[in-house]
Image (tube, grey):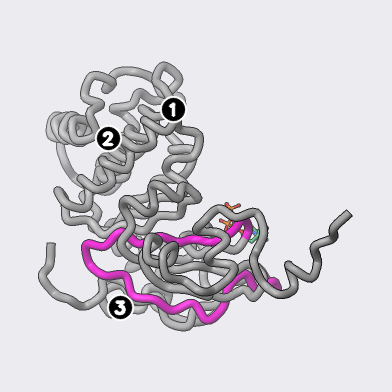
Amino acid sequence: MAESSDPIISVHDLTIAFGPKVIQQNVSFDLKRGSIFAVMGGSGCGKSTLLKSMIGLLRPASGQILVEGEDYWAQNQRRRTELNHRFGVLFQSAALWSSMTVGENVALPMEMFTPLRPDVIRRLVELKLGFVGMEHAVDLMPSEISGGMRKRAGLARAIALDPDILFFDEPSAGLDPITSARLDDLILTLRDGLGATIVIVSHELPSLFKIADDGIFLDAKTHTPIAHGAPRDLRDHSTIPEVMAFMNREATVQDASATKGETHG
Ligand SMILES: Nc1ncnc2c1ncn2[C@@H]1O[C@H](COP(=O)(O)OP(=O)(O)OP(=O)(O)O)[C@@H](O)[C@H]1O
């Protein structure tokens, strides 16, 4: 892990849009090296879309994403692909190839992007699966393992190329609370053990309070971030009604217009 205090990624005045439909604008934040950064906000506010623009799947309408000072979207495709090797991604579904064993899934990025010999790859696959406690599942098919195990296998694949920045989109979706808590511990281990920097999109507030030390809150109504900070700090100290309601799981936003809208009998 580099010792520099410079941000590993800086997002500057980003606008993300689908054609004329602006999803979020004026998005700016620094991703501190070694942090676990939460992208928060209600359904449809643009969390996954922001993630997509950070991992190279969606070109922003304007603004910059600097990866250690290098303007990601100003690079040609070849350079962007090189930068992508620094990124590990785990989507909600874990997205394992169903026709390949767990081990083959983890091996795939190494086969595609490294010149390593098959026996070396096999050893590395065992190491990666060992890291997530899945070494016994190397020869199983994805259909033979549970949802939590699939997530862990997806994690092993996400770290196949030793990325230093990991992106997780709803990693605990569909998991029971205990499996979800174990995944939190694994994410902390990835940060502390491998020195990775992690960006996480999640609605799981207990998980965010436990693991995230920074974040951004995207507002669906105004299409712009309305708060920055660690989820637990936003929960305890934010005075913004939308943020307070979200962080404290309140069904209604406590503001003047909401109170006015209440009817009694
Ligand atoms: N390919 C697309 N074309 C047009 N609009 C899209 C596309 N993908 C997503 N959107 C829209 O962009 C907005 C943001 O979607 P996104 O999936 O990023 O939200 P989210 O905050 O991740 O939501 P959730 O928490 O429900 O997963 C939504 O209004 C969605 O309908």
Residue segment shown in magenta: 19-44
Viewer-nearest residue: 261 or 120: 261
Amino acid type at mark 1: Gly
Amino acid type at mark 2: Ala
Q: Is residue 120 magenta?
A: no
What residue occupies the far right of the structure in this picture? 265
Q: Are marks 1 and 2 in contact (CB under 8 Å)?
A: no
- The quarter of the picture where residue 214 lies is bottom left
Mark 1 residue element: helix
Alpha carbon of mark 1 to alpha carbon of mark 2: how far?
A: 20 Å
Image quarter of the N terminus: bottom left
Q: Which residue is mark 1?
A: 147
* Of the two numbered discs 3 and 1 in the rendering, the one whose residue sits closer to the viewer: 1
- The image's mark for residue 107 is 2
Mark 2 or mark 3: which comes first in sequence? 3
Relative vertical location of residue 234 with respect to residue 209 in this rendering, above or below: below
Q: Which residue is mark 3?
A: 70
Q: Is residue 41 magenta?
A: yes
Mark 2 residue element: helix
Mark 3 residue element: strand
Left of 122 or right of it: where is 76? right
Q: Indicate the quadrant of ligand 1 in the picture.
A: bottom right
Name the residue at 42% across, 43% down: 171
Mark 1 or mark 2: which comes first in sequence? 2
